[in-house]
Image: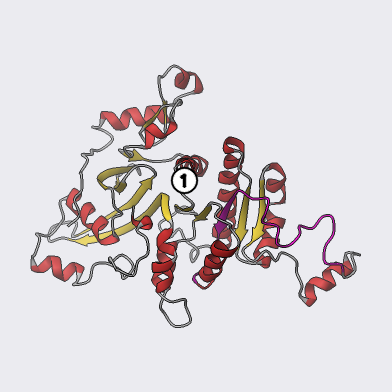
């Protein structure tokens, strides 16, 4: 079993730490300047002269007041990883609010939200690190839609542009030709207002968003032939969900995880999970939820959601928790875990508790995705 260091937590009514956290998160600018450290919403103090110091040990609690704050938390981890020389990064957090916060719940909202988060993180990379960023979408259709929807945001985001994985942005279809003709542009392939194809040379960092499982080979091809060793950030692509589809009929093979996806290091990772547990006394069913959390360079953490919505750390480890391990840590913290080796433990969890990609395998080329 994984060696974990548990952290005590309590309800907000009895916890002085949570009281301090809440006060820090809601303090005014005047109050913040009077403190020796600026408080990160969620708990851990950050030393302005060394932002990394505040993230070294992880967070006792985490409850970002807005997506803007969470994007800046993600940027802080990305900045540390880039400074450490990391090239392939993963950033993952719920793109839309709610327990079912994924593409299936609201596809258009999900797609647009991820582009917006990429603009926020990309703008910070340019403003604070001077790195020019290209946000890469899967194809020209999504590129043209995003360019139209986010035209104003792109104008205000200096150093950030849109692109596609294959570099083909122009609409070469018959419909596209008729649209050009109706706009009085004839059949020209481009104009001064159009962005040219295959213009990757001006980017220092690439952020890839909204790819599907079938498009993962395109991402691999982009990394190997186009990126030229420049850093790549996979933002909210739900790689865990995509990994589960590998090997199925008409999908890429499982080797794609072992040979390629295993190289991506999660630098900011927040995956929420909700469970229920049947018990023999009233209320007979206990609903609980939590998350696997990682904020580079801090270790991996298991968080449990308290009644006030704040995630509280209950365990941490240098290696990534599998979903089964995270669930077990939550049960232990709640006092609902079955005794080790008991019949009920086997009956509830089954003989196989990890997915195929969570199992250690000699075919795995890198352990970066686990650390």
Label 1 SS: loop
Is 12 in front, or is 292?
Answer: 292
Q: Quadrant of residue 50?
A: top left
Residue that badge 1 annotates: 85
Which range is magenta?
Answer: 188-213
Residue drawn 53% across the image and 54% down it: 232
Q: Determine if residue 34 is in view.
A: yes
In the rendered image, the vertical position of residue 343 relative to residue 29, given as above or below: below
Left or right of 286: which side holds 151? Answer: right
- Main SS, magenta region, reads loop
Q: Does the magenta portion include 196?
A: yes
Q: Quadrant of residue 20?
A: top left
Is 121 in front, or is 27?
Answer: 121
Where residue 286 appears, x then y in whole percent? 23, 56
Q: Determine if residue 107 is in view.
A: no
Left or right of 232: which side holds 56? Answer: left
Characterize the local packing of mark 1: few (<14), some (14-19) or many (20 or more) Cα atoms within 10 angstroms: few
Where residue 288 appears, x then y in whole percent? 27, 54
Residue extending farthest top? 34
Residue drawn 35% across the image and 44% down it: 309
Query: In the rendered image, which quarter contains the N terminus?
Result: bottom left
Residue drawn 40% across the image and 78% down it: 247
Where residue 89 appears, x then y in whole percent? 47, 53
Q: Does the magenta portion include 254?
A: no
In the rendered image, the vertical position of residue 340 relative to residue 254, given as above or below: above
The colour scheme applied to this rendered structure is secondary structure
Where residue 70 appears, x then y in whole percent? 47, 43
Is 118 in front, or is 273?
Answer: 118
Left or right of 242: which side holds 188? Answer: right
């Amino acid at each position: 079993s994984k060696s974990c260091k548990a952290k005590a937590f309590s309800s907000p009514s009895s916890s002085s730490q949570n009281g301090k956290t809440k006060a820090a998160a809601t303090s005014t600018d005047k109050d913040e300047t009077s403190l020796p450290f600026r408080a990160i919403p969620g708990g851990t103090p950050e030393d302005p002269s060394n932002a990394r110091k505040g993230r070294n040990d992880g967070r006792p609690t985490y409850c970002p007041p807005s997506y803007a704050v969470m994007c800046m938390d993600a940027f802080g981890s990305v900045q540390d990883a880039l400074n450490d020389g990391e090239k392939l990064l993963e950033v993952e957090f719920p793109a839309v609010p709610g327990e079912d916060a994924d593409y299936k719940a609201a596809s258009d909202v999900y797609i647009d939200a991820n582009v917006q988060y990429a603009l926020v993180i990309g703008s910070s990379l340019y403003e604070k690190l001077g790195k020019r960023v290209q946000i890469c979408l899967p194809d020209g259709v999504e590129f043209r839609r995003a360019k139209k929807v986010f035209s104003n945001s792109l104008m205000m985001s200096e150093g950030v542009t849109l692109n596609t994985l294959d570099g083909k942005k122009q609409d070469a279809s018959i419909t596209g030709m008729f649209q050009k003709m109706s706009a009085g542009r004839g059949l020209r392939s481009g104009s001064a207002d159009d962005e040219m194809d295959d213009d990757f040379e001006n980017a220092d960092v690439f952020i890839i968003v909204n790819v599907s499982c079938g498009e993962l080979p395109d991402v691999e091809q982009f990394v190997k032939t186009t990126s030229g060793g420049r850093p790549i950030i996979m933002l909210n692509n739900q790689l865990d969900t995509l990994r589960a589809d590998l090997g199925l009929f008409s999908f890429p093979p499982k080797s794609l995880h072992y040979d390629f996806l295993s190289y991506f290091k999660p630098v900011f990772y927040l995956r929420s999970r909700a469970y229920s547990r049947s018990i023999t006394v009233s209320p007979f069913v206990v609903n609980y939820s939590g998350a696997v959390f990682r904020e580079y360079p801090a270790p991996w953490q298991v968080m449990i959601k308290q009644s006030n919505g704040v995630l509280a750390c209950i365990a941490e480890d240098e290696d990534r928790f599998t979903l089964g391990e995270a669930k077990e840590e939550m049960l232990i913290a709640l006092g609902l875990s079955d005794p080790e080796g008991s019949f009920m433990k086997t009956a509830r969890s089954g003989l196989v508790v990890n997915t195929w990609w969570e199992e250690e395998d000699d075919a795995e080329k890198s352990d970066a995705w686990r650390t």
